[in-house]
Image (cartoon, rainbow, N blue to C red):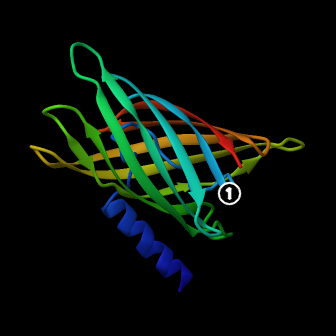
Amino acid sequence: MRRSLLAAVLFALFAVPAAAQETGTPTFLGPDRLFKKSDFGVTVSDPGNGIGVEGFYRMAAGPTQDFGFRVGFADPSGNGSTAFLLGGDYRARLLNHTEDFPLDGALVVGVGASLVEGNNVLFVPIGFSLGRKIMLDNSTTSFVPYFTPTAIPTFADNSDINFSVGLGVDIQFGPQFDLNVSGAIGDLDGISVSFAWLH
């Protein structure tokens, strides 16, 4: 029964791929919540045509769930106007690794916007992050490599659905600090680096 359920979930994930960052930047969440109560930090990203800077805050919403908010700006290269970025997301851990399946998995849903005069865009991602925590021997440092197939419905003058694959790693240094490096290939591409203080 468990294998059948897992097969159905995986089929659904790859038939209808999952979510990326709700503000249109190439930033992704791993399947593991690394904080107990909350975290906050900053993300710097290159979405392929400039630079984005966002601050974020996340809070626990139960033993396996959390939600977060982010706000910032994206400054495109060239003569484009700076966009104001605003978004929120919810993450729920749904899969725990077993002897039969080696990865953890979390559902991620969000909504956000890139706001700039004459070109506002709304993003409503739905997705799933798959990965596994790796602890270093005799160390407080851990790694969570993860990947996220993505579908990102966007609503603007010309609405569309973008597809990408997100790849990333969460590196936790002791109980208080986390570095997340992620990137995307596909319709949404680029790289991002996030630094968080964990509570």
Residue found 67% across the figure and 52% down from its top = 34
Amino acid at dot 1: Lys
| Camera sees residue 47 | no
Image position, residue 78 (x, y; %) = 24, 13
Left or right of 185? Residue 172 is: right
Front position in the image: 9 or 39? 39
Determine whether 133 is above or below 173 in the image: below
Image position, residue 75 (x, y; %) = 33, 22
Determine whether 128 is above or below 62 in the image: above
| Camera sees residue 103 | yes
Image position, residue 14 (x, y; %) = 36, 60
Residue found 39% across the figure and 63% down from its top = 13
Residue found 63% across the figure and 55% down from its top = 33
Mark 1 lies on residue:
37
In the image, farthest residue toward the top:
78
Image position, residue 157 (x, y; %) = 9, 43
Q: Secondary structure at mark 1?
A: loop
